[in-house]
Image: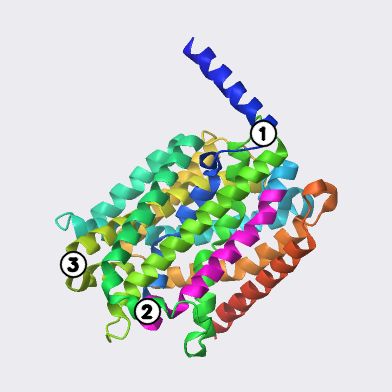
Amino acid sequence: MVGLTNVVREKVTVASLEENQTIPWYRSWGPGAIVAACIIGPGTVTTVSVAGAQFGFQVAWILVLACLVGYFIQRPVINWTVATGTSVLEGIRDEISSLWSKLIFFGLWLGALAFQAGNFIGASMAMNLIFPSVPMLAWVSLLSVSAMGIAWFGVYKVLENINRIVMIMLVLTFCLTALAALPNAGATINQGFTFSIPQGDLLIVLALIATILVPNTLVALSGFMKDKYRHSAYTKEQIRSISVNDLKINFTLLAIISIAILLSSAAAFYGSGQTINSAGDMAVQLTPILGSFATIFFAIGLWTAGFSSGLFNLTVQPMLFGHAFNQSESPDAPVNRIILIVTGLIPIALVWAFGGSPIELIISAQAINGLLLPVLTVVLYRLTNKKDRMGRFHNSASSNIITLFIIGLVTLLAIRVFISFF
């Protein structure tokens, strides 16, 4: 009887949506939360913290620009998935080249393996600050295995709900830390939107954009959308409306979180002569300046950032493998189980072998990501301009202009990465 009631309620809800074309905002919060929670990882927290300590709040506009770039590059991805019912990696495989889809998968997977160690080290640093008696290596193992356990069951709704909570925690913890910094931040806020590049350093612009524009997320969003709306009764227009709202909500939250981290760092360290090299350093050094509560809030935020990014990588790699190789997308498929286990265990092995995440490995991963971005954006541009597949959801002229601008930005980033090798 309860099951029948739920079915009737769902039919009434769908019918009312079709009549009124009005969708409650909370229904919009889904795949974008998973992507945004991945973006705010220990690497982003560290990059933004260091930028705040070095340049103050005057780089806030760059973070807003980076979030806008992330939003606009994903809009055509939404259109593709709505129009075709497939992910962009499947589109690359079927419409461009199966070799390209496989190469892109392996590039993304190698980068994810390297960064995965950093994700769980960041989360473990945070736990070690709160519970210092537990060794950090033990935290790395515990957190990685816990994330593997969640990813093992592969239930999309569980993953979505976890990341909704993650986004709320990230907003609360980092904003509370920023509030603790406000008495020291009055002068810094006015500097945030002067739209000047500090010391003419173009690299800081590229670094902050790169930390928001994570290659994995460019192909993952469409996969999660496909999973969420596979059996949906919504029309294509409704799915696009929901998905665009989802993207807006989560990139707005992403901007708020990033600016809160920047404000905390700028208020505490800018002009003090102190330097920070990691998010863990920042959490420790906040104590004498902003008090122990601010440190605890920041540590909880850092743990949330690291764990959610680690969980994302564990969940997304088997899905991307299925899309790239035209294999089963089921998490129960043997090959997907193997990919999940490898993605989970290699970072633990690296941490136990080296006592941390090898710097050379992280640099290599950053290089792979930096070089993948222009390839991915160009391929996405070509894919989402196939009018025979896109139909009425094809890109507008303004969307194409924005995408070409973004391609130019990420190409600059790739050139910077290439030059750094010499």
370 in relation to 120, above or below: below
| N-term mark: 2 or 1 | 1
Question: Could you tell me which residue is drawn at 43 percent across and 48 percent down?
Answer: 311
Circle 2 crowding by C-alpha within 10 Å: few under 14, some 14–19, many from 20: some
**In which quadrant of the rendered view does residue 9 lie?**
top right
- Whether residue 238 sits left or right of residue 65 in the image: it is right
SS assignment at label 1: helix
Q: Nearer the viewer, mark 2 or mark 3?
A: 2
Q: Position of residue 316 (x, y in %)?
A: 52, 47
Numbered label attached to residue 188: 2
- Using the numbered discs, state the Cα–Cα distance from disc 2 to disc 3 in whole angstroms: 20 Å
- Whether residue 13 sits left or right of residue 199 in the image: it is right
Instruction: Kindly identify the amino acid type of the residue bearing the numbered disc 1.
Output: Asn
**Residue that badge 3 annotates:** 291
**Residue that badge 1 annotates:** 20
329 in relation to 47, above or below: above
419 in relation to 165, above or below: below
